[in-house]
Amino acid sequence: MTKTPSPRRSADDRGFRLVTGFFALLVVLLVAGIFVELFRTSQLSIQKFGFHFWVTKVWDPVAGQFGAFPFIWGTLYSSLLAMLISTPIALGIAIFLTELSPRVLRTPLTFLTELLAAIPSIVYGLWGIFVLVPLVRQLQVHTPEWMRKIPLFSGPPLGVGMGAAALILSVMVIPFTSSVAREVLKAVPNTQREAAYALGATRWEAIQAALRFGRTGIIGAVILGLGRAIGETMAVTMVIGNSPRVSASLFAPQYTMAAVIANEFTEADTDLYLNALIEIGLVLFIITLVINAVSRLLIWSVTREASVKPAKTASPAVSAAPGVAA
Amino acid sequence: MNRTSRRKVLSGVVVFLCAAAVVVALVPLFFVFAYVIQKGFSSLSWDFFTKMPKPVGESGGGMANAIVGSLILIGIASAIAVPVGVIAGVYVSEYGKRRFASLVRFTADVLNGVPSIVIGIFAYGLAVLPVKHFSALAGGLALGFMMIPIITRTTEELLNLVPGILREGALALGATRARAAFSVMVPAALPGIMTGILVALARISGETAPLLFTAFNNRFFTTSLNQPIASLPVQVFTYAIAPYEEWHQQAWAGALVLVAMIFLFSVLARVVTRRLERMHRT
């Protein structure tokens, strides 16, 4: 019947496709629009500093000197530290919830771990300032003298700084990585585990078989977490100390790309200053765009194959970590 | 120890570590909630909802302007994002096999991972730079942009859960695709679409970064869309980094109200989904 629709009806159907398609196009245009707008409004800085912007250490708005290296450093360093802390924990959670947990505990524990993603950044930041930072300061005060000779632990015990930022970031990233890793492990066919058991594997060895099967997706989950860490703004701004310097020390106050935009955007009194901040935003956008695109493709490569046959479990949309369900 | 028992011990150790990972993640969750609830409740009062902020040094006062401001911003964001997100979701679900639908799906997921501060800069360029002043409209725009990909993806997922027989039935009766989509499919998935909207609201109502330089802040009460406007998250931020004890207490109270709001949206989302599931089981 659909082969010979009346002309009127087929025109209606085309209209429906075009109108809804237009709204779908808006989603794509939004991403393109962000790029164009940020590129356009950062021209002053791009043209004046060129590539030097990214390798210069001096950030002196009063003198009109803008170098973004300290922010790049702070963003990469804090995200790397956060990944080191959060990845094992997040994968452990994902493994526990899919492979090991008793049935009665599964739903409440899943809910609780995903609740971590529902707490807004600003609340983490508030808690960071008044609870975590004093705690970190105590830890720093009691760091033995010989350890403080190592560059990693050098500097006065301020509390605020790279260490506090990395800690709060890892807490915030855990639910995102673990929730996607869980989806991936769920998509691994049971035959993989059964085959391992049939060969006499222990529990851990069977889990390894499942992990190996879904490794592309697991890597995707970790990269997705990295994307979150790089773009995280408020909580980091509130605990990292906001000082543009390049240091390996966990004690040292530093700065990130997102934090400098949050702090200085409304203070930017010259066009060049504003353009420099927008250029940082542009690069932040490009980095997170690439990271998210890569992680999505990796995750899809595992979950797509699996989602063809088995029935979906209930309520796919209602996870407390919205939008991370692949 | 022989090889077999070594493997068994290793397996036991890993199982233990995985369970420990869950506990480690729940510790900060517990502490954040404990502090927000304890500190928040001790400084929360009726005044918080009805009074305006007091100047530094005076205790008391509230965040009436910020609460109303937040509601206005959320309203603007929904007005922008709900139609765009839902209709885009209908397209992706109806024409899911097309290349373009895959592209939209992919873009929505990627957009979801773009830092909110970057979305803020975009909204600044669109709605603040041309008119040279901050406004509630700009802030709502930024939040709306963040809601769109979430709504698009959940609408699609939920529409896909509706049995295809319904659409085929409608088409067999001579309905156009638009009719089948908007009179049959969307109503069938409506609770699910509501869920998507609620999830998106839960996600954006605590957002601070994109509001800092779009909606900005306002010491006074306003409902004008064309002026800077206060919001709960920005007010919490301002108070948290200020050096005054009274303001810190207000910040905790604000955080509690924010968390309660998000919790409410999430619970509503869950209730609505339960209903959807029951509907489709029968």
Image (cartoon, coloured by chain):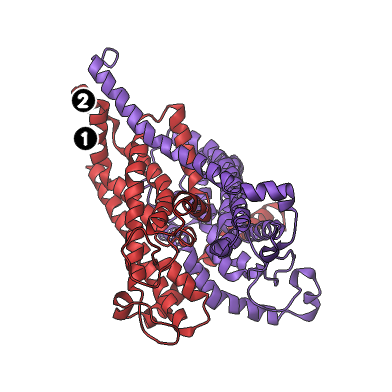
Are labels 1 and 2 on one chain? yes
Q: Which mark is residue B183?
A: 1
Amino acid type for the residue under numbered disc 2 = Ala
In what element is the residue under mark 1? helix
Q: Residue at label 2?
A: B175
**Residue A312 vertical placement versus A321 (above, below):** above
In what element is the residue under mark 2? loop
Residue B274: x, y in percent? 28, 51
Earlier residue among tags 1 and 2: 2
Between B177 and A148, the one lying in front of the other is: B177
The extreme left residue here reads: B173
C-alpha span from label 1 to label 2:
10 Å
Amino acid type for the residue under numbered disc 1 = Ser
Verify CB contact (< 8 Å) between mark 1 and mark 2: yes
Residue A127: x, y in percent? 51, 73
Residue B104's quadrant in the figure? top left
Residue B46's quadrant in the figure? bottom left
**Residue B27 vertical placement versus A294 (above, below):** below
Q: Which chain is red?
A: B
User: Given the image, what chain letter belongs to the residue carrying mark 1?
Assistant: B
**Residue B191 vertical placement versus A17 (above, below):** below
Point out the image quarter for the N terminus of chain B.
Answer: bottom right
